[in-house]
Image: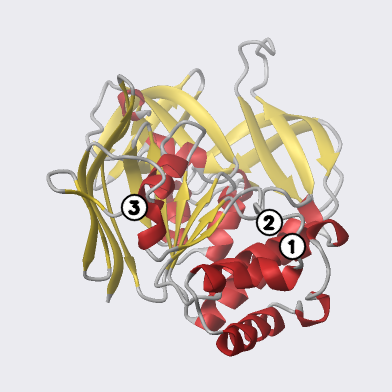
Amino acid sequence: MIELSVEDLHLDYGDVPVLKGVSMDLRQGEVVSLLGPSGSGKTTLLRAVAGLEAAKRGKITIGERVVFDGAKGEVPAEDRNLGLVFQSYALWPHKTVYDNVAYPLQLRRTPAAETRQRVQEVLDQLGLGHLAARHPHQLSGGQQQRVAIGRALVYNPPVILLDEPLSNLDAKLREEARAFLRELIVRLGLSALMVTHDQSEALAISDRILLLNNGRIEQQGTPQQMYGSPRTLFCAEFMGSNNRMNGRVAEVRDGKARIEGAGWQLWGQAAEGLSVGQEATAVIRVEQVRLADDPEGNHLDMQLMTGMYLGDKWEYLFRTPGEESVNAMALRAYGQESRAAGSCRLALPASQVWIFPLAAKG
């Protein structure tokens, strides 16, 4: 069942187009993340769904109810029955945890006995039952976040909208909150649309990711599809930690391409529209590079310049030998031990190298 549908949505800020024909669906029990760089339109899209931004044309449907139609008008934000968790949490500082969570029910004139029951149930689900009498300033950042989520859930909205819900937490707490949020969404069977700029967060929490670029959806799919099968240079570079090599396409056959640079060549997966003679970029995830021979000969001989200890692994920096540093190609790889500087052979499996025409970028 489709809980939320957006069709060909356009929205301008003055004379500047921000959304340029975005279409998407959110199914029941699904978590969809809107991911992209600053200015890509992800927060604007969320706010348009919420009714906080006025779109120019298109259609937004929640369940079977059309809440925006560019030709007919729109339903105001307060009547869309959506749960919204703001980036800043937006808790009432003078209200207790209980009163903050109860506020949406009080607005809907829910009977007092039912309000008490529903608020207590939500607080217990979120592990906040013992904090009902506290005020926001007496809570940690993670506890404030859970209060904001509780306030959005208490009236059982069909869709919950999350605007960068973890961005105010420190790195360690963000990892813990990410796991808690995913578990909560799955356990309660929620349908959630979430804005994030953190790809790790999107990969961990989402069933599907919509990657926005300049007001359009660049690519969408499961986390595995987005990370492992990028269709454009923008998607390949935005997801993950990457190595990038510029060269010219020397051969294309059977869905693969050979790219050549100064003193090197590599085979990889050919993007759509790639042709011989084009300037192109090869991309490979840092974790896919190995210090070894490649059985198919897809390797490069490079000079190890330095290593950096990251706790669970080492990160190595390599450069092409015999070149000035300003002209040398640089590659990064991971390993499990400290290594001395010197010559190394790096295997770059062809199945993990993607080759895109430079014109495909952004």
Which one is in front, 251 or 78? 78
Residue 269 position within the rendered picture, expressed as x and y whole percent measured from the top left: 36, 45
The answer to the question of whether label 1 and label 2 lie on touching residues, with beta carbons closer than 8 A, is yes
Q: Nearer the viewer, mark 1 or mark 2?
A: 1
* 39 lies left or right of 338: left
Residue 272 position within the rendered picture, expressed as x and y whole percent measured from the top left: 24, 40
The answer to whether 192 is drawn above or below residue 307 in the figure is below
- The residue depicted at 43 percent of the width and 34 percent of the height is 40
- Disc 2 marks a residue whose amino acid type is Leu
- The residue depicted at 36 percent of the width and 46 percent of the height is 48
The answer to the question of whether label 3 and label 1 lie on touching residues, with beta carbons closer than 8 A, is no
> At numbered mark 2, what does the secondary structure look like: helix, strand or loop?
loop
Residue 279 position within the rendered picture, expressed as x and y whole percent measured from the top left: 34, 20
Residue 267 visible, this orientation: no
Quarter of image, res 303: top right
- Disc 3 marks a residue whose amino acid type is Pro
Locate the C terminus by quadrant.
Answer: top left
Locate the N terminus by quadrant.
Answer: bottom left
Q: Which mark is residue 76?
A: 3
Quarter of image, res 66: bottom left
Q: Which residue is mark 2?
A: 91
> At numbered mark 3, what does the secondary structure look like: helix, strand or loop?
loop
Residue 312 visible, this orientation: yes
- Disc 1 marks a residue whose amino acid type is Lys
- The residue depicted at 48 percent of the width and 53 percent of the height is 227
